[in-house]
Amino acid sequence: MSDGKLSPSTQRQYQIINALVGLERPSLNDLYQATGIAIPSLRRHLQRLRIDFKLNICYVSEGRRGEGHYLLRGWGILDQNKFLANFGSIGGVEED
């Protein structure tokens, strides 16, 4: 974008990355609570992060009822230190 702002979609993806880093063993509901992004959208964004940025995001199942948590195991094409230095403070999606 020419004005230096991140698109809403990119902001949401960065929120999810920050939640994966900042929360201990985050479930899908934890990610929803931390980001305010609807669960169906979270699922789509998680898939896009895996494809677009080659992030290694794993789902660790805990029990028989579909319970579990997400784990960021690899940063793919992103440099972890640079990402956190530049975008680690992104929280809620900015409204225009």
Image (cartoon, helix red, strand yellow):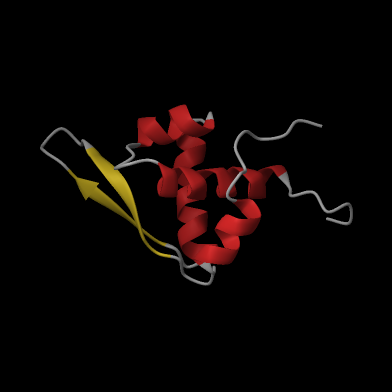
**Quadrant of the image containing the C terminus:** top right
Residue 44 seen in the current view: yes
> Which quarter of the picture shows residue 25?
top left
Query: What residue do we see at 58% from left, 60% from top?
Result: 83
Residue placed most toward the observer, 28 or 41: 28
The x and y percentages for residue 48 are 52, 56
Q: From this viewpoint, which residue is outermost toward the left?
A: 64
Residue placed most toward the observer, 47 or 17: 17
Image: 30 above or below 83: above
The x and y percentages for residue 71 are 32, 52
* Total numbered labels: 0
**Quadrant of the image containing the N terminus:** bottom right
The x and y percentages for residue 31 are 42, 36
Query: What residue do we see at 15% from left, 32% from top?
Result: 65
The x and y percentages for residue 93 are 66, 35
Residue placed most toward the observer, 10 or 73: 73
Q: From this viewpoint, which residue is outermost toward the bottom?
A: 77
